[in-house]
Amino acid sequence: MGELNQARMEELIKAEEAYRSETMSSSVFEVDAIVKMAKRFLEVGTTTSRLQLGPPEINETIKDAIESGYGSILLRELSVLELTEVNEKNRVTLFVQLCSLAMEQEVGLSSARRRYLSALRKAALPLFVYIVYSPIQLGYFLRLTVNERTFICLKLIAKWYRNKSKEELIIIVHFWPTVDGSRHHDVWRHCRWIFKEQIVFEEMADLIDQVELDDLMADPHMRSVGDYLSEEVAIRYLPQRSVARALSQRDRMEIGRCLRSEEWNRKTSAVEIMFIAKHFENHTDMDTDFVMNTRLKRAYAVLCSSATYVSKKVCVIRIVKRSASVRRPQTGLESLEICTAVLEDLMRNQNARMYNQYPKENGTGNYGKFSTKYEVSPGPLSCFENACKFNSATRFSGINSLCILQKNQYDAALLIKTAIPINLFFDCFVIVGISPSVFKMDRIMAEFDEYKKALNPNSRLIFIGVDSLGMYPPVDSRQDVLMVSGVTEYTMYRVNSFIEL
């Protein structure tokens, strides 16, 4: 991302020190803790133990750190963040909070506090062009500032539009006709009063109106998606009907090439490909693109057969009940299908192990063992028999199934306990289920804490509730626990980031 202005940062640090000296508050924050909190928020998406679906929201822990006079640390972490679609919601949220753009107006601020917040805003504002550059990110920005459209906020919105060329506006309005539920015409109209020269405002208003009213995408030079979206971005926007319908033959070939590349395999996940394919298939008002669906299906199989390496040793525990599976109305995917993809992503890691039972050679029964996927089969998992297969020709089926993994559901607390006497070292336990009822939280947490005392005090624990996960207040403030409530296309990136933190 763009570099921070050194002079402005020096001014900010001086203002911070003066503010902290004046307040003399016994802050609960330490510098290392704030750095870790910022990384966790930007890469995982939460500062607490709970990660759930939903629109961007002001984060209270981040707010407390800023109010305690540590905004410069958060700003530095934001400035060095690698920009991806996965972290865009988090980075827009942090930017808005650093600039105090979503704060209620406060009366009677001390001069030191006012100087500190002003210096923080001045240092952070230049990052706007890097953090909010797509219509999706603008939508997050509008959502977070809906109740506080200050002069500065409106100037940033106006800057976003004025930085776009006519060609860029044509693309944006065609593929993203609304941002946060509003037409571009209406968003721009809110900026009228910040312009001294109304002719400047009206020129942009006329251009937006022209783009919205006229079919400017009919221009011959605008007919290929690849002219303005990279292959990777185009793949991620395949679920968007306007993008899918605009694909040319050349676009399809380039996307197919990208889906086969090792670089794409390193960046994506089985969960993401499954969601993309299903959303793409759901375009019921257009002819189904069987060739593209076949490419996505093949990409899923190749991905599941390819190994990854994460330095952390992970234990994956499945507590999945077939009867809990439901069909998601938004996507048409079954809970079991999503569970399969989650387990595929977790078990691709050569350092991930799952407990399984194997028949004894003498035929007298079974024995248990923590195994990697590659000790059993090199191909994709099929963890829930045929129930995990897609029903139509465009869906994904298990190839070279791990039959041993199909049959058993295990007691998570007991498995964690089992690892202690055999001195099996794990950096992280990941427990996967569908609904909240299968997670026996008290027992699991008790055994996890015993494991930390006995073998690895730095071990972490992740609960993944594919459909949802109930609240469990005893772990709310724990930094070694992550509770994932609901799975979306980007969930596994956040899970892997937490494992690697």
Image: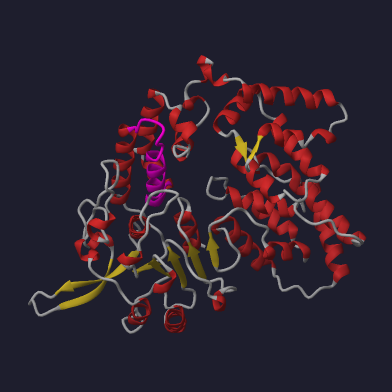
Residue 298, compared with residue 291, is above or below; it is below
Residue in the picture at 78% in, 75% down? 26
**In this rendering, would 77 be left or right of 261?**
right
Task: Decide: is 191 above or below 110.
Answer: above
Q: Is residue 271 above or below residue 298?
A: below
Location of the N terminus by quadrant is top right
Query: Looking at the image, which is closer to me, 388 or 380?
Result: 388
| Residue 457 x %, y % | 48, 78
Toward the top, the furthest residue is 220
In the rendering, at what x and y percent does residue 169 appear?
Answer: 63, 27
Q: Position of residue 369 (x, y in %)?
A: 25, 73
For the record, the magenta segment spans: 268-289
Nearest the eye: 190 or 413: 190
Is residue 283 highlighted in magenta? yes
Question: Does any portion of residue 458 appear in the rendered image?
Answer: yes
Q: Position of residue 148 (x, y in %)?
A: 78, 50
